[in-house]
Image (cartoon, grey):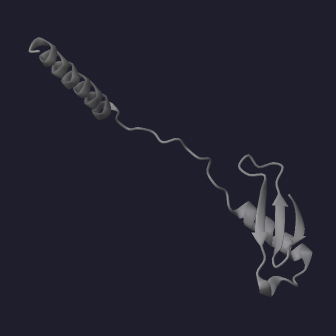
Amino acid sequence: MKGTLLKGANRRMVVVRSRDSKLFEEAHFILREESADAALPDLLEEANRIVEKSHFPAPRRAIRKNGIPFTAGVFMGAGVEALGLAVYFLFR
């Protein structure tokens, strides 16, 4: 991983770019005021340590455990609607 140090108007930031990660391209670390005069190699080492330590699992899609109640509700609603239309047209 390669890191760079960016200077802003009021904040300093370390950006760590990753080439071998499938989850993210870069990580941004905003420095605290008291660590503003720390050495660049120390900052990059700490940022890389944090990135390597935090492995996020890949996002999973929501799995519907049981679609039977939903499907039954749809068919019951359609049946009630069909019954209502039949009664309307028969007794009109």
**Residue 87, position as x, y percentages in the image:** 12, 18
Name the image quarter holding the N terminus.
bottom right
- Which one is nearer the viewer's eye here, 86 or 35? 86
Question: As drawn, is 57 to the left or to the right of 88?
Answer: right
Q: Most extreme residue toward the front, as rendered?
A: 92
Q: Most extreme residue toward the left, as rendered?
A: 91
Residue 53 quadrant:
bottom right
Question: As drawn, is 31 to the left or to the right of 5?
Answer: left
Please tell me whether residue 75 is drawn above or below residue 42 in the rendered image.
above
Residue 5 quadrant:
bottom right
Please tell me whether residue 79 is drawn above or below residue 3 in the rendered image.
above
- Which one is nearer the viewer's eye here, 31 or 83? 83
Q: Kindly identify the residue that appears in the image at 73 percent across and 46 percent down.
A: 22
**Residue 18, position as x, y percentages in the image:** 82, 54
Question: As drawn, is 5 to the left or to the right of 60?
Answer: right
Q: Most extreme residue toward the top, as rendered?
A: 90
Q: Kindly identify the residue that appears in the image at 85 percent across and 73 percent down.
A: 8
**Residue 49, position as x, y percentages in the image:** 77, 67
* Total tally of numbered discs in the picture: 0
Q: Kindly identify the residue that appears in the image at 19 percent across and 18 percent down.
A: 85
Name the image quarter holding the C terminus.
top left
